[in-house]
Amino acid sequence: MKTLQLSLVDVERCAPEGLAAAIERPQAEQLASLLKAIADPTRIQLISYINASSNAEACACNLTEPLALSQPTLSHHLKVLTDAGLIERDKRGTWVWYRVNQERWKQLSKLFEL
Amino acid sequence: MKTLQLSLVDVERCAPEGLAAAIERPQAEQLASLLKAIADPTRIQLISYINASSNAEACACNLTEPLALSQPTLSHHLKVLTDAGLIERDKRGTWVWYRVNQERWKQLSKLFEL
DNA sequence: TCATTACATAGATGTTTATCTATGTTTACA
DNA sequence: TGTAAACATAGATAAACATCTATGTAATGA
């Protein structure tokens, strides 16, 4: 019957096409949590400020003012970035210096070569 | 006096170092909203599935099942990605086909060459 | 040892967001 | 024209999150 045949053709046109290697859930969650760490305007600016500082490192004490953040809020964002492994903490006396983890950053950039 | 001098030295060691071009707030917000669109495991998988499909395009009707999503939830995620300009909508009859916007994707990848 | 400074943690609050159910809209076709 | 299928939108809800104030911790220096 014609209708059935057309229907079959239509179904075929909408049928799942062969998927190449699609990202599985656990890896997708891992990537998402890494991206979430960066997907915030304040943290993007933080990374930018750190990287743009001389020696590519910045003292926390110099980050509150340019970004107009309270000290606990800054501390929170730096922790999020540190936990994600995107920046590294280096305590020197009373101050804490941060630098971008270039390895981790390169890892991320590869994601977008998909 | 020695204390004052030391204090000055210390301040200098913590003083703001010359910043190169740091990302300003409006641009940071733009980048963050783009990254937020991807920073979700479901949407990462969606992009992956679309790109891994033959012809690098996928019908919405084929995306609910492999990702175990309800139809409205799928529709929501596809809208988020579409609004961010990361995928493109192409309605063909009853079905809607999506493909990744490669231009936009390349733009993003440049972000990580920082 | 005490005061001060730099930073972290805890708890509270308002906003965003991922998901659901229910319903609306559009297209194909008999 | 009327029905069915594919998708979008609306509204509700619970979880996640950015920010704040208040307080704790650790290091410095007198």
Image (cartoon, coloured by chain):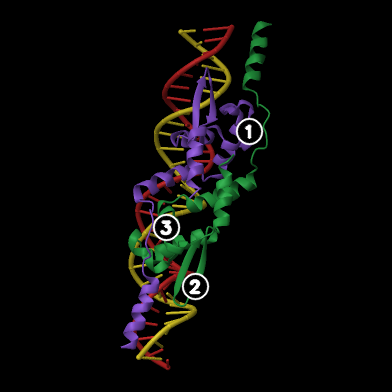
Chain colours: A green, B purple, C red, D yellow
Name the image quarter holding the N terminus of chain B. Answer: bottom left
* Residue at 38%, 63% in the rendered image: A63
Q: Residues within 10 Å of mark 1 (few under 14, many from 20)?
A: many
Q: Quadrant of residue B57?
A: top right
Amino acid type at image mark 1: Ala
In terms of secondary structure, where does tag 2 sit? strand
For disc 3, the chain is A
Q: Position of residue A109 (x, y in %)?
A: 55, 47
Q: Quadrant of residue B74?
A: top right
Q: Position of residue B66 (x, y in %)?
A: 64, 35
Closer to us: B43 or A85: A85
Closer to us: A82 or A4: A82
Q: Nearer the viewer, mark 3 or mark 2?
A: 3
Q: Residues within 10 Å of mark 2 (few under 14, many from 20)?
A: few
Which disc number belongs to residue A112? Answer: none
* Residue at 56%, 28% in the rendered image: B60
Q: CA distance from mark 3 to mark 2?
A: 20 Å
Amino acid type at image mark 3: Ala
Q: Is residue A68 visible?
A: no
Which disc number belongs to residue A91? Answer: 2
Q: Label 1 near label 2: C-beta < 8 Å?
A: no
Q: CA distance from mark 2 to mark 1?
A: 45 Å
User: Which residue is label 1 attached to?
Assistant: B52
For disc 1, the chain is B
Closer to us: B58 or A60: A60
Q: CA distance from mark 1 to mark 3?
A: 37 Å
User: Which residue is label 3 attached to?
Assistant: A52
Q: Position of residue A45 (x, y in %)?
A: 41, 54
Q: Quadrant of residue A85?
A: bottom right
Amino acid type at image mark 2: Lys
Q: Position of residue C14 (x, y in %)?
A: 35, 53
Q: Nearer the viewer, mark 1 or mark 3?
A: 3
